[in-house]
């Protein structure tokens, strides 16, 4: 995976428990990106975490992300909030986009808390393209919601801020009833909010990005073989193993990030066999995500 060297130029609070990080390219221009994209951030504590880009795609000098301090942190957000200092050199990946903004005459954007990060550049791009766009931005309280003032200053009445400690939960059914015929809905935020959006809005109109995988049920895991076409090797994936771990332990190094099927870092090409896709991205034909997905056939052949 291609990496870029950056310097943490600025880390500043943007809400209660949320930091904005401004990363400046250390070796010239950074790779381009489009709204909805995210980067892998390699931390000095050997963890890699994914964060949505929330700055200006036209700015090739810097990337901006925002990080919520998760009370159940697995070491990423805690390190960033407590130990990561300005001036530190950090490696970041080339941006990837599993949440692209499709053309439409009208958009309804729904964001909850730190889920505002991929939505911010989408709203700006939609307005610049001449589309009608509305943002419903939800959070526990105004103090907990990043970038509220920035959004209001840039977009005025297009932004409807909904602090649930004052106004309760928003009425997604009412929002759905008012959708125009060509309106697309983009939604990012906590799991219960996304579940409510899926229940209220037509699936063909709704585009969702999850920070955590949705609950799913599958048949019990069974062992299978992975034939690696280029290296001419066969790796056994046990019922207790992930495909990602089995391949890595066999010396076939595959980069990974979330290990939950939401970031796309561990994508590989599938040559033959019937995969069982367990990711939340929606693997394209001939692709699969090795951290969570398995096989429905006795074996798979992959391009490794």
Image (spheres, grey):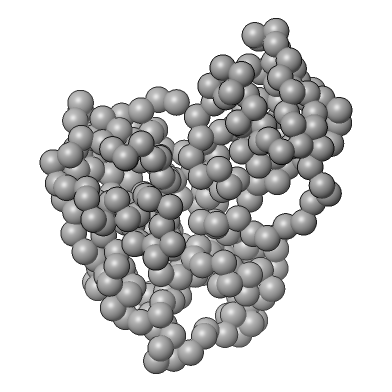
Q: Residue at x 58, y 47 (%)?
A: 260
How far from the left and from the top, in percent, is residue 90? 26, 36
Q: Which one is in front, 192 or 205?
A: 192
Q: Which one is in front, 109 or 255?
A: 255
Q: Which one is in front, 64 or 277?
A: 277
Q: Residue at x 38, y 50 (%)?
A: 75
Please count the marks in the image: 0
242 horizontally vs 219: left or right: left
How far from the left and from the top, in percent, is residue 280? 63, 50
Tell me if residue 30 can be seen: no
Rendered view: 227 above or below 5: above
The image quadrant of residue 283 is: top right
The image quadrant of residue 122 is: bottom left
Q: Which one is in front, 258 or 220?
A: 220
How far from the left and from the top, in percent, is residue 263? 52, 44
Which of the image's four quarters has the N terminus?
Answer: top left
The image quadrant of residue 151 is: bottom left
237 horizontally vs 12: left or right: right
Rendered view: 245 above or below 188: above
282 horizontally vs 47: left or right: right
Tell me if residue 170 can be seen: yes
Rendered view: 184 above or below 251: below
243 horizontally vs 123: left or right: right
How far from the left and from the top, in percent, is residue 148? 29, 73
Which of the image's four quarters has the C terminus?
Answer: top right
Q: Residue at x 53, y 64 (%)?
A: 187
Q: Residue at x 39, y 33 (%)?
A: 94
């Amino acid at each position: 995976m291609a990496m870029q060297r950056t310097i943490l130029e600025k880390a500043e609070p943007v809400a209660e428990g949320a930091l904005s990080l401004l990363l400046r390219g250390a070796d010239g221009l950074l790779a381009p990106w489009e709204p909805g994209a995210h980067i892998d951030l390699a931390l000095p504590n050997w963890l890699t975490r994914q964060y949505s880009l929330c700055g200006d795609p036209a700015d090739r000098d810097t990337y901006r992300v925002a990080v919520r301090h998760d009370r159940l942190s697995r070491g990423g957000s805690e390190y960033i909030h407590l130990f990561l200092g300005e001036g530190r050199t950090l490696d970041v990946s080339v941006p990837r986009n599993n949440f692209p903004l499709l053309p439409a005459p009208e958009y309804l954007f729904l964001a909850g808390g730190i889920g505002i990060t991929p939505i911010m550049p989408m709203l700006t791009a939609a307005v610049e393209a001449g589309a009608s766009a509305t943002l419903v931005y939800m959070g526990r309280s105004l103090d907990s919601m990043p970038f509220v003032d920035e959004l209001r200053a840039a977009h005025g009445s297009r932004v409807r801020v909904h602090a649930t400690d004052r106004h309760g939960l928003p009425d997604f059914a009412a929002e759905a009833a008012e959708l125009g015929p060509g309106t697309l809905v983009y939604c990012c935020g906590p799991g219960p909010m996304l579940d409510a959006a899926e229940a209220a809005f037509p699936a063909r109109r709704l585009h969702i990005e999850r920070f955590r995988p949705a609950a799913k049920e599958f048949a019990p895991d069974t062992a299978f073989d992975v034939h690696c076409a280029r290296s001419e090797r066969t790796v056994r994936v046990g019922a207790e193993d992930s495909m990602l771990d089995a391949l890595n332990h066999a010396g076939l190094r595959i980069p990974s990030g979330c290990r939950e099927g939401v970031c796309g870092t561990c994508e590989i090409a599938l040559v033959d066999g019937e995969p069982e896709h367990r990711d939340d991205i929606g693997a394209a034909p001939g692709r699969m995500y090795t951290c969570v997905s398995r096989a429905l056939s006795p074996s798979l052949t992959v391009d490794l």
